[in-house]
Image (cartoon, rainbow, N blue to C red):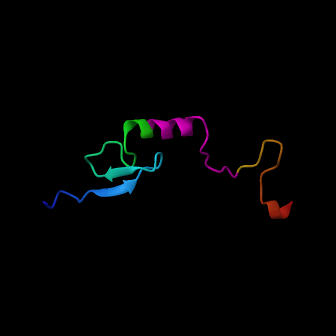
C-alpha cells in the first residue's frame, strides 16, 4: 500500500444493512449501491427524515419560553 492509498473499510449500508466498502473506489459510500443511495435520498425528499426546528409556530410569540 502506498502513502496515498487508504485501507478499505467494510461498513454497514444505512439502507439495506448489507456490507459496503467505505473507500474512494465506492462512489456511493456509505451506501452499497446507487439503489440504496437513491432510496435514502427519496426518504429525505418525502420528509421521512426531519431535522428538528426550534422556531415556534406562526401563532406563538418568539422569545424565551421561561419569560412567558
In the rendering, at what x and y percent does residue 30 appear? Answer: 39, 49
The outermost residue toward the bottom is: 66
Q: Say which of 39 and 52 sits in front.
A: 39
Horizontal relation, residue 5 to residue 68: left or right:
left
The outermost residue toward the right is: 68
Q: Is residue 15 positioned above or below 34 on the image?
A: below
Q: Where, by quadrant of the figure, is residue 65 drawn?
A: bottom right
Q: Say which of 45 and 26 sits in front.
A: 26
Q: Is residue 42 found inside the magenta-colored segment of the image?
A: yes
In the rendered image, the quadrant that contains the C terminus is bottom right
Q: Where, by quadrant of the figure, is residue 28 drawn?
A: top left
Residue ID at (45%, 35%): 38
Q: Is residue 22 positioned above or below 44 on the image?
A: below
Q: Say which of 56 and 18 sits in front.
A: 18
Residue ID at (77%, 56%): 63
- For the record, the magenta segment spans 38-54
Q: Say which of 1 and 19 sits in front.
A: 19
In the rendering, at what x and y percent does residue 66 appear? Answer: 82, 64
Residue ID at (78%, 60%): 64
Q: Where, by quadrant of the figure, is residue 59 drawn?
A: top right
Horizontal relation, residue 65 to residue 53: left or right:
right
Amino acid at each position: 500500500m502506498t502513502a496515498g492509498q487508504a485501507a478499505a473499510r467494510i461498513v454497514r449500508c444505512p439502507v439495506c444493512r448489507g456490507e459496503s466498502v467505505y473507500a474512494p473506489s465506492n462512489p456511493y459510500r456509505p451506501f452499497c449501491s446507487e439503489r440504496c443511495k437513491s432510496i435514502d435520498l427519496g426518504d429525505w425528499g418525502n420528509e421521512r427524515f426531519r431535522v428538528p426546528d426550534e422556531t415556534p409556530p406562526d401563532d406563538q410569540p418568539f422569545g424565551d419560553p421561561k419569560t412567558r
